[in-house]
Amino acid sequence: MQSRDHFATRLGFVLAAAGSAVGLGNIWKFPYMTGQSGGGAFLLIYLGFVFTIGFSVMLAEFTIGRAGQRNPVGAFRALKDGPWSAVGGLGVLAGLVILSFYSVVGGWTIAYAVKAATGALAHSDPKSLGDTFGGFISEPWGVIGFHSLFMALTAGVIAGGVRGGIERASRILMPILAILVMILALRAVTLDGAEKGIAFFLTPDFSKVTWDTVNAALGQAFFSLSLGMGAMLTYASYLDKQVNLPRTAAQVTFLDTAFAIIAGFMILPAVFAFGFDPASGPGLTFITLPAVFAQMPLGQAFAFMFFALLAIAALTSAVSILEPVVAYLIDERRMPRRWAALLSGVMIWALGVPSALSLGPWKDMTVGGKGFLDAMDYLASNIMLPTGGVLIALFVGWSISARAQEEAQSDGSHPFPLIRVWIFICRFVAPAAVAWVLISGL
Ligand code: TRP
């Protein structure tokens, strides 16, 4: 245990956790999910989940990770004998599934940074932007090539350990991305015809809410906050006692939500202003944003910077998905870090190939009525993560409740006034809400 790497500072940890949370989930997935799920009502339900269950499960993961000082499987086992370590195992599996498609979309962002730099995106006609995306996605070698590059970068960072480059890079790059997203949002909301998009985003129309909306909002809350598979747990295992966990969880939750909402203002008004279809799914960000860039001075430079920074934000998230898998192989299977990174990287890459092809050459192959990428996303976000999250909440709320309350408050040095509310949510609210959503789906 002495040799375990630790974050040097609290700020380092906040940035790593925020780097994990803020990624494609906020900027790519949140706007298109909102578009598919009818707008304002989705937003409201999403926020409801984030600040109750989301925050509580994040604090639960921080608590288990710091108390256990191990990978997800080992941390559960260190705190309690019995079958609980299977929750960690489920998390490791979820990591494989999530990263397989996450890396594909990460690859798209790199490809779009290249396209922006070469001027291939510099037009604002919706039809031809749709064709550009459609053309890119149906040409298998490009998509697989960029998926391979993204996966290699992720595994490479993990092979070198979490501390070095990525932590330092995100310290500088994340604030720049935040500023860029705000500038783009300002441009989008002042476009002609943007009001319809703003109204769509902010006016809840509950007549459109179905079980699918609620389920999508729950899955998105887990996905965006990086919860339910032990990513936050693993990061917190590299943490010392002094850190105030509830405060940190609140900051990360807030930051992640702010990014998502601003991304909504960046995409949805533009969707309506240019006459795109809000329900067009995973391509939405990639076809809408170039139209916005084309309406800006220095649009090409903005486009390049935006996609490059988004690729980096995606990388800091991808790293946090791979780290629990690799930590598991190191701690529990005694594998050297480099081998663990290589082995898991290759497996996840292979699992990602059908996703990479699923919007192009293999678009007629469906799993449960969805394309392969969508199906993987659904399996992970809407089933594995909520299930994992509930088990994490139950573990903290019932199985190690006293220990968890001490750990969450750093043995009394950071009293948390809402500690009883937190335990109540872990015990009753989170399990009941998630069970209700999952069961009413069947
Ligand atoms: N939260 C990240 C995003 O929004 C993705 C992510 C990173 C993630 N780590 C995770 C999702 C762990 C689920 C579980 O892009």
Image (tube, rainbow, N blue to C red):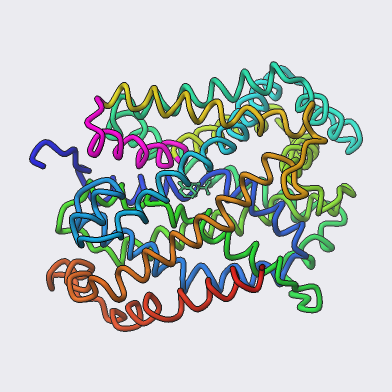
* Place of residue 388 in the rendered image (x, y in percent of width and height, measured from the top left): 44, 59
| The magenta stretch spans residue 252 | no
* Place of residue 287 in the rendered image (x, y in percent of width and height, measured from the top left): 78, 38
Residue 375 relative to residue 94: left or right: right
Image quadrant holding the N terminus, namely top left
* Place of residue 270 in the rendered image (x, y in percent of width and height, measured from the top left): 79, 50
Q: In which quarter of the image is residue 109?
A: top right
Depth check: 261 or 54 in front? 54
| The magenta stretch spans residue 322 | yes
The residue that appears at 64% across and 49% down in the rendered structure is 29
Depth check: 180 or 66 in front? 66
The residue that appears at 78% across and 55% down in the rendered structure is 269
Relative height, residue 412 to residue 338 (above, below): below
Relative height, residue 430 to residue 1 (above, below): below
Residue 126 relative to residue 36: left or right: right
Image quadrant holding the C terminus, namely bottom right
Relative height, residue 16 to residue 430 (above, below): above
The range drawn in magenta is 317-336
Residue 161 relative to residue 29: left or right: left
Q: Main secondary structure of the magenta part?
A: helix
* Place of residue 291 in the rendered image (x, y in percent of width and height, measured from the top left): 80, 38
